[in-house]
Image (tube, rainbow, N blue to C red):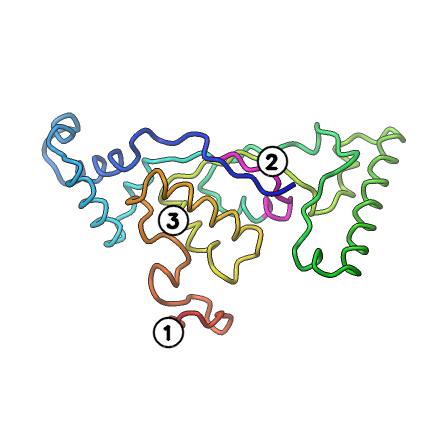
Amino acid sequence: MAMKVSLITFTEQPELTVARAARLCYSAVGIDQLSRQMSVEDCHKLLGKIIDLGHWSALEHASFTFAVEGVSRALSHQLVRHRLASYSQQSQRYVAADQPTVVVPPTIEAQPEALVVFRQLVEAAASAYRKLTELGIPREDARYVLPNAAETKLVMTMNARELRHFFRLRCCRRAQWEIRHLAETILGLVQAVAPRLFAGAGAECQTTGFCPEGELSCGLAPVRQ
């Protein structure tokens, strides 16, 4: 199954919400008066200013929720390292995996001999899972034999500040291919609904012009000293 990502809900008027929160920090008047006084141009200028200056706390007031399907457990194990987010993931404890769908890495798929080895091991794991459940082993224990390649589904919510951090790390050319694909897909989705909130978002070399990876750099940008 191919990766499928959709933006299922987000804060109403996310850019205006962030701009109002940012302006409130420096204003003597209340939010109602601020809202009446703030034009669309004011909103856009303020967003550009706080993003350029790195004053990102106000970005936390805009949240985005995504449905993600057709990804591997290897990806979800990486994803939950982004702790300033909320996740709801399909359970291997309650959902049977008698015929598990798997994600095949492109490097394996491109090499016939490697693909045979991969398929054999996946089927062996599935066969062991089925045999264990037939023996009365509960799913929560039988799942221990399932591979990281097993396909999963999840719902994820992140605020705009954490999303920019997520893009900074996971859009990098050195990020693992699957989570990089996820990050790039999500970046396209949020830029479509909040272009100024995510202006310039992406890998760190794209946002700062420098690579933070040191001797592990891909060489696309100069390494930060």
SS label for mark 3: helix
Above or below, 111 relative to 43: below
SS label for mark 1: loop
Amino acid at the residue labelled 2:
Lys
Above or below, 137 relative to 46: above
Determine whether, in the image, residue 217 is placed left or right of residue 224. Answer: right
Give x and y (percent) for residue 47. Answer: 23, 45
- Tell me the residue at 84%/31% (across/down): 133
Q: Which residues are magenta?
A: 66-77
- Residue 76 inside the magenta-drawn segment: yes
Q: CA distance from mark 3 to mark 2?
A: 23 Å
Residue at image mark 2: 153
Q: CA distance from mark 2 to mark 1?
A: 40 Å
Q: Which mark identifies residue 164?
A: 3
Determine whether, in the image, residue 182 is placed left or right of residue 54. Answer: right
Above or below, 106 relative to 148: below
Above or below, 96 relative to 46: above
Label 3 or label 2, whichever comes before in sequence order: 2
- Tell me the residue at 47%/59% (across/down): 172
Closer to viewer: mark 3 or mark 1: 3
Q: Label 1 neighbourhood size at 10 Å, few (<14), some (14-19), many (20+)?
A: few
- Which quadrant of the view contains residue 18? top left
